[in-house]
Image (spheres, rainbow, N blue to C red):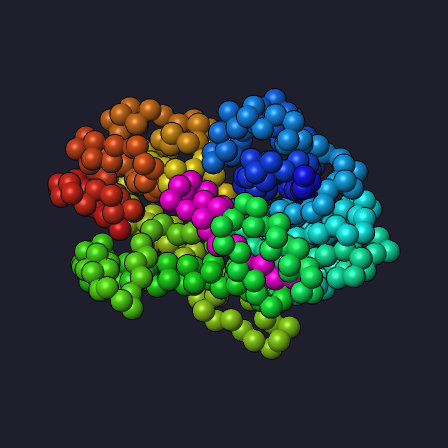
Amino acid sequence: MTTVGVIGLGYVGLPLAVAFAQEGCEVIGVDIDPRKVEAIRAGESYVEDVPSATFAELGERLHASTRYGELARADAVLICVPTPLSRNREPDLGPLIDSTRALAEVLRSDQLVVLESTTYPGTTRERVAPLLEESGLAAGRDFHLAFSPERVDPGRTDFTLRTTPKIVGGLTNACAERAEALYGLVCDHVVRVSSPEAAELTKLLENIFRSVNIALVNELAMLTDRMDIDIWEVVDAAATKPYGFMRFEPGPGMGGHCLPVDPFYLSWRAREFDMATEFIELAGKVNQQMPYHCVAKAQRALNDRGLAVKGARVAVVGVSYKPGVGDVRESPALKIISLLRELGAEVLYHDPHVPVLGEFALESTPLEQAVADADLALIVTAHPGVDHELIARRARLVLDLRGVTRRASTANVVRL
Ligand SMILES: NC(=O)c1ccc[n+]([C@@H]2O[C@H](COP(=O)([O-])OP(=O)(O)OC[C@H]3O[C@@H](n4cnc5c(N)ncnc54)[C@H](O)[C@@H]3O)[C@@H](O)[C@H]2O)c1
Protein backbone atom coordinates (compact mmCIF):
# COMPACT_ATOMS: atom_id res chain seq x y z
CA MET A 1 0.00 0.00 0.00
CA THR A 2 1.29 3.47 -0.90
CA THR A 3 1.60 5.96 1.94
CA VAL A 4 1.14 9.57 0.87
CA GLY A 5 1.97 12.62 2.97
CA VAL A 6 0.27 15.95 2.26
CA ILE A 7 1.64 19.17 3.76
CA GLY A 8 -0.95 21.97 3.96
CA LEU A 9 -4.55 20.81 4.27
CA GLY A 10 -6.35 23.75 2.67
CA TYR A 11 -8.44 24.09 -0.48
CA VAL A 12 -5.81 22.18 -2.44
CA GLY A 13 -4.29 19.77 0.07
CA LEU A 14 -7.43 18.45 1.71
CA PRO A 15 -9.23 17.27 -1.47
CA LEU A 16 -5.95 15.75 -2.66
CA ALA A 17 -5.45 13.90 0.62
CA VAL A 18 -9.03 12.63 0.44
CA ALA A 19 -8.59 11.48 -3.19
CA PHE A 20 -5.53 9.36 -2.34
CA ALA A 21 -7.25 7.90 0.73
CA GLN A 22 -10.28 7.06 -1.42
CA GLU A 23 -7.97 5.08 -3.72
CA GLY A 24 -6.85 2.98 -0.78
CA CYS A 25 -3.63 4.83 0.11
CA GLU A 26 -2.72 5.57 3.68
CA VAL A 27 -2.60 9.36 3.91
CA ILE A 28 -0.80 11.45 6.51
CA GLY A 29 -1.90 15.07 6.35
CA VAL A 30 0.20 17.68 8.13
CA ASP A 31 -0.88 21.25 8.82
CA ILE A 32 0.48 23.83 11.24
CA ASP A 33 -3.08 24.98 11.95
CA PRO A 34 -4.26 22.79 14.85
CA ARG A 35 -7.90 23.80 14.21
CA LYS A 36 -7.78 22.13 10.79
CA VAL A 37 -6.20 19.00 12.22
CA GLU A 38 -8.81 18.85 14.98
CA ALA A 39 -11.65 19.41 12.51
CA ILE A 40 -10.48 16.49 10.36
CA ARG A 41 -10.12 14.29 13.42
CA ALA A 42 -13.63 15.27 14.46
CA GLY A 43 -14.93 14.41 10.97
CA GLU A 44 -15.86 18.01 10.16
CA SER A 45 -14.93 19.40 6.77
CA TYR A 46 -14.06 23.06 6.25
CA VAL A 47 -13.70 22.78 2.46
CA GLU A 48 -16.96 22.84 0.49
CA ASP A 49 -15.82 20.26 -2.07
CA VAL A 50 -15.21 17.70 0.68
CA PRO A 51 -18.41 16.59 2.41
CA SER A 52 -17.94 15.82 6.14
CA ALA A 53 -19.36 12.33 5.61
CA THR A 54 -16.24 11.48 3.57
CA PHE A 55 -14.09 11.38 6.71
CA ALA A 56 -16.20 8.63 8.28
CA GLU A 57 -15.95 6.58 5.06
CA LEU A 58 -12.16 6.92 5.03
CA GLY A 59 -11.72 5.95 8.68
CA GLU A 60 -8.08 5.42 9.63
CA ARG A 61 -6.83 5.85 6.05
CA LEU A 62 -6.70 9.63 6.48
CA HIS A 63 -4.72 10.72 9.47
CA ALA A 64 -4.16 14.41 10.26
CA SER A 65 -1.40 15.78 12.43
CA THR A 66 0.57 18.91 13.22
CA ARG A 67 3.77 16.88 13.46
CA TYR A 68 6.14 16.49 10.52
CA GLY A 69 7.78 13.44 12.11
CA GLU A 70 4.96 11.25 10.84
CA LEU A 71 5.94 12.01 7.24
CA ALA A 72 9.06 9.87 7.60
CA ARG A 73 7.02 6.78 6.76
CA ALA A 74 5.45 8.24 3.60
CA ASP A 75 6.49 7.01 0.13
CA ALA A 76 5.60 10.41 -1.34
CA VAL A 77 5.07 13.84 0.19
CA LEU A 78 3.05 16.54 -1.61
CA ILE A 79 3.57 20.17 -0.57
CA CYS A 80 0.41 22.29 -0.83
CA VAL A 81 1.17 25.33 1.33
CA PRO A 82 0.16 28.90 0.41
CA THR A 83 2.30 31.03 -1.91
CA PRO A 84 1.02 34.56 -1.28
CA LEU A 85 2.46 37.95 -2.13
CA SER A 86 4.24 40.10 0.42
CA ARG A 87 2.99 43.61 1.24
CA ASN A 88 5.04 45.05 -1.59
CA ARG A 89 3.61 42.44 -3.96
CA GLU A 90 6.64 40.18 -4.19
CA PRO A 91 6.55 36.39 -3.83
CA ASP A 92 6.35 35.39 -0.18
CA LEU A 93 7.95 31.97 -0.02
CA GLY A 94 7.83 31.96 3.80
CA PRO A 95 5.34 29.06 4.21
CA LEU A 96 7.09 27.11 1.45
CA ILE A 97 10.54 27.57 3.01
CA ASP A 98 9.26 26.72 6.51
CA SER A 99 7.50 23.58 5.35
CA THR A 100 10.42 22.43 3.19
CA ARG A 101 12.88 22.93 6.06
CA ALA A 102 10.65 20.97 8.40
CA LEU A 103 10.33 18.20 5.82
CA ALA A 104 14.13 18.10 5.34
CA GLU A 105 14.48 17.13 8.99
CA VAL A 106 12.51 13.93 8.46
CA LEU A 107 13.29 13.22 4.81
CA ARG A 108 14.60 9.77 4.05
CA SER A 109 16.09 8.20 0.94
CA ASP A 110 13.82 6.97 -1.85
CA GLN A 111 11.00 9.30 -0.96
CA LEU A 112 9.27 11.31 -3.67
CA VAL A 113 8.62 14.99 -2.92
CA VAL A 114 6.25 16.95 -5.15
CA LEU A 115 5.60 20.67 -4.92
CA GLU A 116 2.00 21.54 -5.87
CA SER A 117 1.89 25.19 -4.76
CA THR A 118 1.76 27.69 -7.60
CA THR A 119 5.08 29.49 -7.98
CA TYR A 120 7.59 30.99 -10.42
CA PRO A 121 9.77 28.83 -12.70
CA GLY A 122 12.89 27.78 -10.85
CA THR A 123 11.39 27.40 -7.36
CA THR A 124 11.55 23.60 -7.23
CA ARG A 125 15.14 23.38 -8.45
CA GLU A 126 16.63 26.51 -6.87
CA ARG A 127 14.72 26.83 -3.61
CA VAL A 128 13.13 23.50 -2.67
CA ALA A 129 15.95 21.14 -3.72
CA PRO A 130 18.74 22.90 -1.74
CA LEU A 131 16.61 23.08 1.40
CA LEU A 132 15.74 19.38 1.18
CA GLU A 133 19.40 18.59 0.54
CA GLU A 134 20.23 20.02 3.97
CA SER A 135 19.10 16.54 5.04
CA GLY A 136 22.33 15.21 3.55
CA LEU A 137 20.41 13.46 0.76
CA ALA A 138 20.85 14.52 -2.88
CA ALA A 139 17.83 15.48 -5.00
CA GLY A 140 17.43 13.26 -8.06
CA ARG A 141 19.82 10.68 -6.61
CA ASP A 142 18.77 9.83 -3.07
CA PHE A 143 15.22 11.16 -3.27
CA HIS A 144 12.94 12.14 -6.12
CA LEU A 145 11.66 15.67 -6.66
CA ALA A 146 9.01 17.02 -9.03
CA PHE A 147 6.60 19.89 -9.56
CA SER A 148 2.96 19.22 -10.35
CA PRO A 149 0.61 22.19 -10.39
CA GLU A 150 -2.80 21.96 -8.81
CA ARG A 151 -5.69 22.71 -11.15
CA VAL A 152 -8.55 22.42 -8.67
CA ASP A 153 -11.37 24.89 -9.26
CA PRO A 154 -13.34 25.02 -6.00
CA GLY A 155 -17.06 24.57 -6.52
CA ARG A 156 -16.66 22.98 -9.97
CA THR A 157 -18.33 19.62 -10.44
CA ASP A 158 -18.04 18.96 -14.20
CA PHE A 159 -14.26 18.38 -13.96
CA THR A 160 -12.71 16.63 -11.00
CA LEU A 161 -9.20 15.74 -9.89
CA ARG A 162 -9.68 12.42 -11.68
CA THR A 163 -10.86 13.85 -14.99
CA THR A 164 -8.59 16.91 -15.15
CA PRO A 165 -5.23 16.08 -16.75
CA LYS A 166 -2.35 16.53 -14.30
CA ILE A 167 0.94 18.13 -15.38
CA VAL A 168 4.15 16.68 -13.99
CA GLY A 169 7.75 17.89 -14.40
CA GLY A 170 10.55 15.99 -12.65
CA LEU A 171 14.09 16.99 -11.76
CA THR A 172 15.22 13.81 -13.57
CA ASN A 173 13.45 11.25 -15.72
CA ALA A 174 13.22 8.91 -12.78
CA CYS A 175 11.66 11.69 -10.67
CA ALA A 176 9.04 12.29 -13.37
CA GLU A 177 8.31 8.59 -13.67
CA ARG A 178 7.74 8.26 -9.93
CA ALA A 179 5.44 11.29 -9.89
CA GLU A 180 3.57 10.07 -12.96
CA ALA A 181 2.96 6.69 -11.34
CA LEU A 182 1.76 8.31 -8.12
CA TYR A 183 -0.72 10.68 -9.77
CA GLY A 184 -1.90 7.85 -12.01
CA LEU A 185 -3.64 6.52 -8.89
CA VAL A 186 -5.99 9.52 -8.71
CA CYS A 187 -5.92 11.05 -12.23
CA ASP A 188 -6.93 9.40 -15.51
CA HIS A 189 -4.46 11.41 -17.54
CA VAL A 190 -1.00 12.55 -16.42
CA VAL A 191 0.88 14.85 -18.80
CA ARG A 192 4.64 14.82 -18.48
CA VAL A 193 6.68 17.89 -19.35
CA SER A 194 10.45 18.00 -19.59
CA SER A 195 11.30 19.88 -16.39
CA PRO A 196 9.90 21.35 -13.16
CA GLU A 197 10.34 24.81 -14.74
CA ALA A 198 8.07 23.90 -17.67
CA ALA A 199 5.46 22.59 -15.21
CA GLU A 200 5.74 25.71 -13.03
CA LEU A 201 5.29 28.00 -16.02
CA THR A 202 2.40 25.93 -17.40
CA LYS A 203 0.34 26.73 -14.31
CA LEU A 204 1.21 30.42 -14.53
CA LEU A 205 0.32 30.54 -18.23
CA GLU A 206 -3.12 29.09 -17.42
CA ASN A 207 -3.79 31.70 -14.76
CA ILE A 208 -2.33 34.62 -16.72
CA PHE A 209 -4.44 33.60 -19.72
CA ARG A 210 -7.56 33.96 -17.58
CA SER A 211 -6.44 37.17 -15.95
CA VAL A 212 -5.60 38.84 -19.29
CA ASN A 213 -8.84 37.77 -20.96
CA ILE A 214 -10.96 38.85 -18.01
CA ALA A 215 -9.16 42.22 -18.09
CA LEU A 216 -9.86 42.56 -21.81
CA VAL A 217 -13.59 42.06 -21.41
CA ASN A 218 -13.61 44.27 -18.29
CA GLU A 219 -11.96 47.09 -20.21
CA LEU A 220 -14.58 46.71 -22.92
CA ALA A 221 -17.30 46.78 -20.24
CA MET A 222 -16.00 50.17 -19.06
CA LEU A 223 -16.03 51.38 -22.66
CA THR A 224 -19.50 50.02 -23.50
CA ASP A 225 -20.79 51.77 -20.38
CA ARG A 226 -19.81 55.09 -21.95
CA MET A 227 -20.99 54.04 -25.40
CA ASP A 228 -24.30 52.78 -24.04
CA ILE A 229 -23.87 49.34 -25.59
CA ASP A 230 -24.82 46.20 -23.65
CA ILE A 231 -21.57 44.27 -23.02
CA TRP A 232 -23.47 41.05 -22.26
CA GLU A 233 -25.21 41.18 -25.60
CA VAL A 234 -21.85 41.67 -27.32
CA VAL A 235 -20.18 38.80 -25.44
CA ASP A 236 -23.13 36.49 -26.21
CA ALA A 237 -23.00 37.43 -29.86
CA ALA A 238 -19.23 36.97 -30.16
CA ALA A 239 -19.54 33.59 -28.46
CA THR A 240 -21.65 32.32 -31.34
CA LYS A 241 -18.44 32.15 -33.39
CA PRO A 242 -17.57 28.46 -33.39
CA TYR A 243 -13.80 28.98 -33.56
CA GLY A 244 -11.17 31.56 -32.60
CA PHE A 245 -13.13 33.08 -29.73
CA MET A 246 -13.40 32.03 -26.10
CA ARG A 247 -16.05 33.46 -23.87
CA PHE A 248 -14.98 35.48 -20.81
CA GLU A 249 -17.42 37.38 -18.64
CA PRO A 250 -17.01 40.91 -17.38
CA GLY A 251 -17.38 41.38 -13.63
CA PRO A 252 -16.43 43.38 -10.56
CA GLY A 253 -12.77 42.28 -10.62
CA MET A 254 -10.75 39.22 -9.76
CA GLY A 255 -10.66 37.42 -6.44
CA GLY A 256 -9.45 34.26 -4.80
CA HIS A 257 -6.02 33.02 -3.96
CA CYS A 258 -4.90 32.51 -7.57
CA LEU A 259 -5.68 35.08 -10.26
CA PRO A 260 -4.91 38.27 -8.32
CA VAL A 261 -1.68 36.75 -6.96
CA ASP A 262 -0.02 34.15 -9.19
CA PRO A 263 0.70 36.26 -12.30
CA PHE A 264 2.88 38.54 -10.16
CA TYR A 265 5.11 35.61 -9.28
CA LEU A 266 6.09 35.56 -12.93
CA SER A 267 6.43 39.31 -13.39
CA TRP A 268 8.74 39.35 -10.35
CA ARG A 269 10.86 36.53 -11.75
CA ALA A 270 10.90 38.11 -15.22
CA ARG A 271 12.68 41.18 -13.84
CA GLU A 272 15.75 39.02 -13.22
CA PHE A 273 15.77 38.39 -16.97
CA ASP A 274 15.45 42.10 -17.86
CA MET A 275 11.87 41.60 -18.96
CA ALA A 276 8.79 43.57 -18.02
CA THR A 277 5.77 41.31 -18.48
CA GLU A 278 3.42 44.03 -19.60
CA PHE A 279 0.34 41.90 -20.24
CA ILE A 280 0.42 40.77 -16.62
CA GLU A 281 0.80 44.28 -15.21
CA LEU A 282 -1.83 45.74 -17.51
CA ALA A 283 -4.35 43.00 -16.73
CA GLY A 284 -3.74 43.51 -13.01
CA LYS A 285 -4.26 47.24 -13.39
CA VAL A 286 -7.52 46.93 -15.36
CA ASN A 287 -8.95 44.27 -13.05
CA GLN A 288 -8.03 46.26 -9.94
CA GLN A 289 -9.93 49.23 -11.34
CA MET A 290 -13.18 47.29 -11.65
CA PRO A 291 -14.47 47.67 -8.06
CA TYR A 292 -14.02 51.46 -8.43
CA HIS A 293 -15.87 51.41 -11.73
CA CYS A 294 -18.68 49.38 -10.17
CA VAL A 295 -19.02 51.73 -7.21
CA ALA A 296 -19.08 54.72 -9.57
CA LYS A 297 -21.83 52.97 -11.50
CA ALA A 298 -23.77 52.38 -8.25
CA GLN A 299 -23.33 56.04 -7.42
CA ARG A 300 -24.76 57.08 -10.80
CA ALA A 301 -27.67 54.64 -10.55
CA LEU A 302 -28.64 56.12 -7.17
CA ASN A 303 -28.09 59.64 -8.43
CA ASP A 304 -30.45 59.02 -11.36
CA ARG A 305 -33.14 58.33 -8.75
CA GLY A 306 -32.32 61.42 -6.77
CA LEU A 307 -30.39 59.54 -4.08
CA ALA A 308 -26.90 60.02 -2.72
CA VAL A 309 -24.67 57.13 -1.72
CA LYS A 310 -24.28 58.79 1.66
CA GLY A 311 -27.09 57.47 3.79
CA ALA A 312 -28.31 54.98 1.14
CA ARG A 313 -28.88 51.36 2.20
CA VAL A 314 -27.06 49.04 -0.16
CA ALA A 315 -27.64 45.28 -0.06
CA VAL A 316 -24.65 43.47 -1.54
CA VAL A 317 -25.76 40.09 -2.87
CA GLY A 318 -22.91 37.55 -2.99
CA VAL A 319 -19.65 38.44 -1.26
CA SER A 320 -17.42 35.42 -1.91
CA TYR A 321 -15.05 35.70 -4.85
CA LYS A 322 -16.90 33.22 -7.06
CA PRO A 323 -20.23 31.40 -7.28
CA GLY A 324 -20.89 28.35 -5.13
CA VAL A 325 -18.08 28.82 -2.61
CA GLY A 326 -17.66 30.68 0.68
CA ASP A 327 -14.08 31.82 0.06
CA VAL A 328 -13.80 35.61 0.44
CA ARG A 329 -10.02 35.89 -0.10
CA GLU A 330 -9.28 38.91 -2.30
CA SER A 331 -12.99 39.07 -3.17
CA PRO A 332 -13.86 42.28 -5.06
CA ALA A 333 -17.01 42.45 -2.92
CA LEU A 334 -14.84 43.40 0.07
CA LYS A 335 -13.32 46.31 -1.82
CA ILE A 336 -16.77 47.38 -3.01
CA ILE A 337 -18.14 47.29 0.55
CA SER A 338 -15.28 49.41 1.90
CA LEU A 339 -15.62 51.93 -0.92
CA LEU A 340 -19.38 52.19 -0.35
CA ARG A 341 -18.84 52.63 3.38
CA GLU A 342 -16.24 55.33 2.77
CA LEU A 343 -18.89 57.16 0.75
CA GLY A 344 -21.27 56.91 3.68
CA ALA A 345 -23.53 54.07 2.51
CA GLU A 346 -25.09 51.71 5.01
CA VAL A 347 -24.14 48.29 3.71
CA LEU A 348 -25.83 44.99 4.43
CA TYR A 349 -25.25 41.74 2.58
CA HIS A 350 -26.73 38.39 1.67
CA ASP A 351 -24.59 35.34 0.95
CA PRO A 352 -25.73 31.77 1.69
CA HIS A 353 -22.08 30.65 1.72
CA VAL A 354 -20.72 33.39 3.98
CA PRO A 355 -22.69 33.67 7.23
CA VAL A 356 -20.42 36.33 8.76
CA LEU A 357 -18.09 39.02 7.41
CA GLY A 358 -15.94 39.56 10.48
CA GLU A 359 -13.87 42.44 9.13
CA PHE A 360 -17.01 44.52 8.55
CA ALA A 361 -18.85 43.22 11.65
CA LEU A 362 -21.71 42.10 9.39
CA GLU A 363 -23.89 39.01 9.29
CA SER A 364 -25.70 37.73 6.23
CA THR A 365 -29.27 39.06 6.06
CA PRO A 366 -32.02 36.82 4.60
CA LEU A 367 -32.44 37.68 0.90
CA GLU A 368 -36.02 38.95 0.95
CA GLN A 369 -35.38 41.15 3.95
CA ALA A 370 -32.13 42.51 2.47
CA VAL A 371 -33.87 43.36 -0.80
CA ALA A 372 -36.91 44.90 0.88
CA ASP A 373 -34.76 47.10 3.13
CA ALA A 374 -32.36 48.39 0.49
CA ASP A 375 -32.32 51.46 -1.74
CA LEU A 376 -30.01 49.47 -4.02
CA ALA A 377 -29.45 45.73 -4.41
CA LEU A 378 -25.98 45.16 -5.78
CA ILE A 379 -25.40 41.71 -7.28
CA VAL A 380 -21.67 41.14 -6.93
CA THR A 381 -21.42 37.33 -6.99
CA ALA A 382 -24.19 35.23 -8.51
CA HIS A 383 -24.45 32.05 -6.43
CA PRO A 384 -26.52 29.20 -7.83
CA GLY A 385 -29.74 28.88 -5.86
CA VAL A 386 -30.08 32.62 -5.17
CA ASP A 387 -33.26 33.92 -6.79
CA HIS A 388 -31.94 36.80 -8.89
CA GLU A 389 -35.22 37.24 -10.68
CA LEU A 390 -36.90 37.83 -7.34
CA ILE A 391 -34.32 40.54 -6.68
CA ALA A 392 -35.09 42.12 -10.06
CA ARG A 393 -38.82 42.02 -9.32
CA ARG A 394 -38.77 43.22 -5.72
CA ALA A 395 -35.83 45.57 -5.30
CA ARG A 396 -36.36 49.29 -5.74
CA LEU A 397 -33.13 49.49 -7.72
CA VAL A 398 -30.73 46.74 -8.85
CA LEU A 399 -27.17 46.97 -10.14
CA ASP A 400 -26.28 43.61 -11.64
CA LEU A 401 -22.53 43.12 -12.07
CA ARG A 402 -22.89 39.54 -13.34
CA GLY A 403 -25.48 39.74 -16.09
CA VAL A 404 -27.87 37.36 -14.31
CA THR A 405 -30.97 39.55 -14.57
CA ARG A 406 -30.92 39.81 -18.32
CA ARG A 407 -34.30 38.20 -18.71
CA ALA A 408 -35.87 40.79 -16.40
CA SER A 409 -35.65 43.96 -18.43
CA THR A 410 -37.44 46.15 -15.94
CA ALA A 411 -36.64 49.81 -15.49
CA ASN A 412 -35.28 49.27 -11.98
CA VAL A 413 -32.40 47.09 -13.22
CA VAL A 414 -29.05 48.50 -14.31
CA ARG A 415 -26.24 46.20 -15.47
CA LEU A 416 -22.47 46.42 -15.69
N1 LIG B 1 -7.40 27.40 -3.89
C1 LIG B 1 -7.31 27.14 -5.17
O1 LIG B 1 -8.29 27.16 -5.89
C2 LIG B 1 -5.97 26.78 -5.81
C3 LIG B 1 -5.97 26.23 -7.09
C4 LIG B 1 -4.77 25.88 -7.68
C5 LIG B 1 -3.59 26.12 -7.00
N2 LIG B 1 -3.58 26.68 -5.76
C6 LIG B 1 -2.29 26.87 -5.10
O2 LIG B 1 -2.14 25.86 -4.10
C7 LIG B 1 -1.44 26.37 -2.98
C8 LIG B 1 -2.26 26.20 -1.71
O3 LIG B 1 -3.45 26.96 -1.84
P1 LIG B 1 -4.73 26.73 -0.94
O4 LIG B 1 -5.83 27.49 -1.56
O5 LIG B 1 -4.92 25.29 -0.65
O6 LIG B 1 -4.26 27.47 0.41
P2 LIG B 1 -4.94 27.34 1.84
O7 LIG B 1 -4.55 28.55 2.59
O8 LIG B 1 -6.37 26.97 1.72
O9 LIG B 1 -4.20 26.07 2.50
C9 LIG B 1 -2.85 26.04 2.79
C10 LIG B 1 -2.67 25.29 4.11
O10 LIG B 1 -1.28 25.22 4.39
C11 LIG B 1 -1.10 25.35 5.79
N3 LIG B 1 0.27 25.73 6.07
C12 LIG B 1 0.85 26.95 5.97
N4 LIG B 1 2.14 26.89 6.31
C13 LIG B 1 2.40 25.60 6.63
C14 LIG B 1 3.53 24.91 7.08
N5 LIG B 1 4.70 25.54 7.24
N6 LIG B 1 3.43 23.59 7.33
C15 LIG B 1 2.25 22.95 7.18
N7 LIG B 1 1.13 23.54 6.76
C16 LIG B 1 1.21 24.86 6.49
C17 LIG B 1 -2.14 26.36 6.20
O11 LIG B 1 -2.43 26.26 7.58
C18 LIG B 1 -3.31 25.97 5.32
O12 LIG B 1 -4.18 25.05 5.95
C19 LIG B 1 -1.11 27.81 -3.32
O13 LIG B 1 0.15 27.87 -3.92
C20 LIG B 1 -2.15 28.16 -4.34
O14 LIG B 1 -1.72 29.20 -5.21
C21 LIG B 1 -4.77 27.01 -5.14
Residue at left 72%, top 45%? 75
Majority secondary structure of the magenta segment?
A: loop
Residue 48, x across and y down, in percent: 47, 34
The residue that appears at 19% across and 56% down in the rendered structure is: 233
Q: Nearer the viewer, residue 237 or 260?
A: 237
Q: Number of labelled discs?
A: 0
Quarter occupied by residue 381: top left
Residue 323, given in percent of the width and then of the height, sits at 37, 41
User: Which image quarter is the N terminus in?
Assistant: top right
Between residue 18 and residue 331, name the one nearer to us: 18
User: Is residue 410 toward the left or the right of residue 28 in the image?
Assistant: left
250 horizontally vs 328: left or right: left
Toward the bottom, the furthest residue is 274
Q: Residue at x 65, y 47 (%)?
A: 78
Residue 167 among those drawn in magenta? yes
Magenta stretch? 153-171
In the picture as drawn, the residue positioned furthest to the left comes out as 410
Q: Residue at x 22, y 64 (%)?
A: 241
Give residue 393's quadrant in the image. Answer: top left
Q: Eyeballing the image, is 347 above or below 84?
A: above
Left or right, 116 with reference to 312: right
**Image location of residue 272, percent across then percent down:** 64, 73
Q: Quadrant of ligand 1?
A: top right
